[in-house]
Amino acid sequence: MQTQVQRLREVLELLKPVVPTKTTLPVLTNVLLKDSYATACDLETRVDIAFPEAQDALLLPYRDVVALLKNIPGSTKLNILSVREGKETKVSLLAGETMASFKVPLEEDYPPRPKETKLQGEFRISGDKLIKDLDELSTYAAREDSRTVLRAVGLFFGDAPDLVAADGFRLGVRSLGGSLKLEGVESVLIPLDAVPLLSHLWRKGIV
């Protein structure tokens, strides 16, 4: 697999919020490269970034690779090689005169991609407004893990779609304007932890 240092750095930066620093499942501290995507997952949230260079299936140790690439010129060509060694994989990165190898789990140990849900419908809205409203309403949502439904921002569809958040004492509502209708769907919950992630991806020009 071949790419440029800057290209991989940009992809890893996008995935940063989803790579856990502490986890009971160590494989999640890696990033999966497979089927033209780079993927990070913390079991609650999964982000897939288009990465056409990812023709081989392998894992990269996120923080080790970020540290390695930090001081390498972005225009440097980067070759990534992997060799299976029993129940592990040896991944080697070669960029100019810099080479490093890491032992990582097998790619099949990474949580599989869930089946895609196809929704029928389309809605256009200013991304800046949506992200701004989500950020503001997230302050109204409950913080306790035990209150799953309230630990989110609700998006209600219809002729007057709204974003709604509440913690049992306060209620916040933002009108999105226009009309939003999806077949068989009345509302969705956007988990509180997903709000800063969406904001991060929007600022980077991904969503």
Image (cartoon, rainbow, N blue to C red):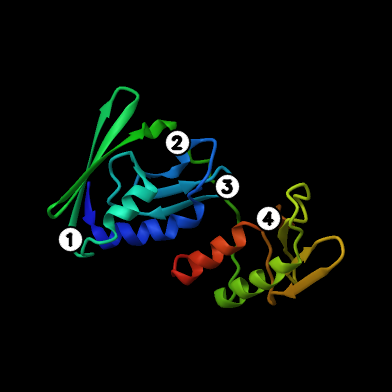
**Of the image marks 4 and 1, the number of the one nearer the N terminus:** 1
Q: Amino acid at mark 1?
A: Thr
Classify mark 2: residues with Cα within 10 Å, few (<14), some (14-19) or many (20+): many
Of badges 4 and 3, the one in the foreground is 3
* Coordinates of residue 40 in the picture (x, y in percent): 46, 48
Q: Amino acid at mark 4?
A: Glu
Q: Which residue is mark 1?
A: 76
Q: How far, Cα to Cα, is label 1 from label 3?
A: 39 Å
Do the CB atoms of the residues marked 1 and 2 lie less than 8 Å apart? Answer: no
x 73%, y 49%: residue: 145
Label 2 residue SS: loop
Q: Which residue is mark 3?
A: 117
In the orientation shown, which residue stands out farthest toward the left?
Answer: 97
x 38%, y 34%: residue: 107
**Of the image marks 1 and 3, the number of the one nearer the N terminus:** 1
Q: Amino acid at mark 2?
A: Tyr
Q: Amino acid at mark 3?
A: Thr
* Coordinates of residue 19 in the picture (x, y in percent): 48, 49
**Of the image marks 4 and 3, the number of the one nearer the N terminus:** 3
Q: Which residue is mark 4?
A: 183
Q: How far, Cα to Cα, is label 2 from label 4?
A: 33 Å
